Amino acid sequence: MELVVLFGTFVLLLLIGTPIAFCLGVASFATILFMGLPPVVVFQRLNSGVAIYSLLAIPFFIYAGDLMVRGGIAARLVAFAGSLVGHMRGGLGQVNIAASTMFGGISGSAIADASAIGGLMVPQMKARGYGIDYAVNITVTSAVIALMIPPSHNMIIYSISAGGRISIADLFTAGVIPGLLLAIALMVVAYVVAAKRGYPTEKFAGFGVVLQLLLAAVPGLILIAIIFGGVRSGVFTATESSCIAIVYALLVTLLLYRSMGWRDFVAATLGAVRTTAMVLMVIGSAATFGWLLAYMRVPAQLVALMQTISDNPIIVLLLINVLLLFLGSFMDMSPLIIITTPIFLPVAVAYGVDPVHFGVIMVLNLGIGLCTPPVGSVLFVGCAVAKIPIWEAIKTIWPFYGASIGVLLLVTYFPATAMWLPSLFR
């Protein structure tokens, strides 16, 4: 009956349009009252859910990403990507994907990626005769790459949700190859769709221009190396690297590029504060919700249920992926990671899946959910940037969904795609 109260309250609030943090918090509060537990437990669990040192990396990376967007680093990365792949069929679509991959290595956020790269690329693609739905589809699905490669915020959340026992450095490393595979798959689909629609190719600017734009983009690319190399080598932690990212972003934008004014700095700071407040509220509420699930022994019951369905790891992983894809269509990514990690991770481990490998599967899976209606936040951002209805984009996004799910299945059933690179550092 407690589970009925918990999920019934949550679903009811979700259906009437209540923000996700309040859905989780109110459902947890109602269930605790129903169970006769002290109401103060809700606030204790909420506080303990956000009072984690490793979580400091998230607001700092968010702030660094805002500074880089407003300081012109994103625009220089787009220009460099254009010089590399702009001459391919559907050139601006290829530029969009390549730029998303590079910017994702700085921001670690799919929403920031869709907003920054979409804001730069969608108007250009529209002006050059590309279909607006094509521009949105590429912007939205390529933003998922930012979730896979360092400094992915959601990899940090997964590590914390798993009890802090999983190395963030290993997770960062494990996501690199799947992220690149996703980029390649999307570029192939973008090429095929562009050829079918007759979109133009762009003229190759020449190696001299490529070198010139590379030099302009080097400061942004160096930051990727600092974040990944520093965390992977153990020189500093993910939290420390996020602080270094802010200092570096300020130095580059203020002293080298000289492209950030006082208004931009204030806007970036206030934007990071607002985003951080929303993210941490969701994380705290989800931590309370997840604690209740553990208190009611839901993970243990699910393991037992899965074992009655099948003892084949292939079937079990397929079921988990289907469930996560379904849940990702209705809930945002961060709370889902916090809630479902304690539920599904024991199941995956019981069938011999490495926790690092499972983290990559979960982040990629739920990242696809961010592009799926009715609660796909990245899809909403992409459509808002392009000023088109969601359903106009959804009608033609299926080839890009197919490529993303294909990469998900590849990563799921071929663990080496995620685990080979971390093994080199052990």
Image (cartoon, rainbow, N blue to C red):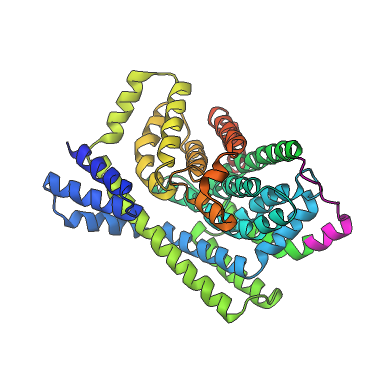
Give the residue displayed 43% in from the left and 50% down from the top.
157
The image shows a total of numbered marks equal to 0
Give the residue displayed 24% in from the left and 41% down from the top.
8
Q: From the viewer's perspective, is residue 38 above or below residue 302?
A: below
Residue at the far bottom: name it. Answer: 262
Q: Residue 16: percent from the left, percent from the top?
A: 30, 49
Q: Residue 394: percent from the left, percent from the top?
A: 55, 41
Q: Is residue 202 left or right of residue 329?
A: right
In the rendered image, is residue 14 in sight? Answer: yes
Considering depth in this image, is 370 or 361 the residue closer to the camera?
Answer: 370
Q: Which residues are magenta?
A: 198-213
Q: Is residue 172 left or right of residue 349?
A: right
Give the residue displayed 11% in from the left and 47% down from the top.
36
Q: Residue 93: percent from the left, percent from the top?
A: 70, 48
Considering depth in this image, is 169 or 306 the residue closer to the camera?
Answer: 306
In the rendered image, is residue 234 in sight? Answer: no
Q: Which quarter of the image is occupied by the N terminus?
A: top left
Q: Residue 138: percent from the left, percent from the top?
A: 63, 46
Q: Which quarter of the image is occupied by the C terminus?
A: top right
| 286 within the magenta span | no
Q: Is residue 415 left or right of residue 154?
A: right
Considering depth in this image, is 293 or 185 the residue closer to the camera?
Answer: 185
Residue at the far left: name it. Answer: 36
Give the residue displayed 55% in from the left and 61% down from the top.
241
| 202 within the magenta span | yes
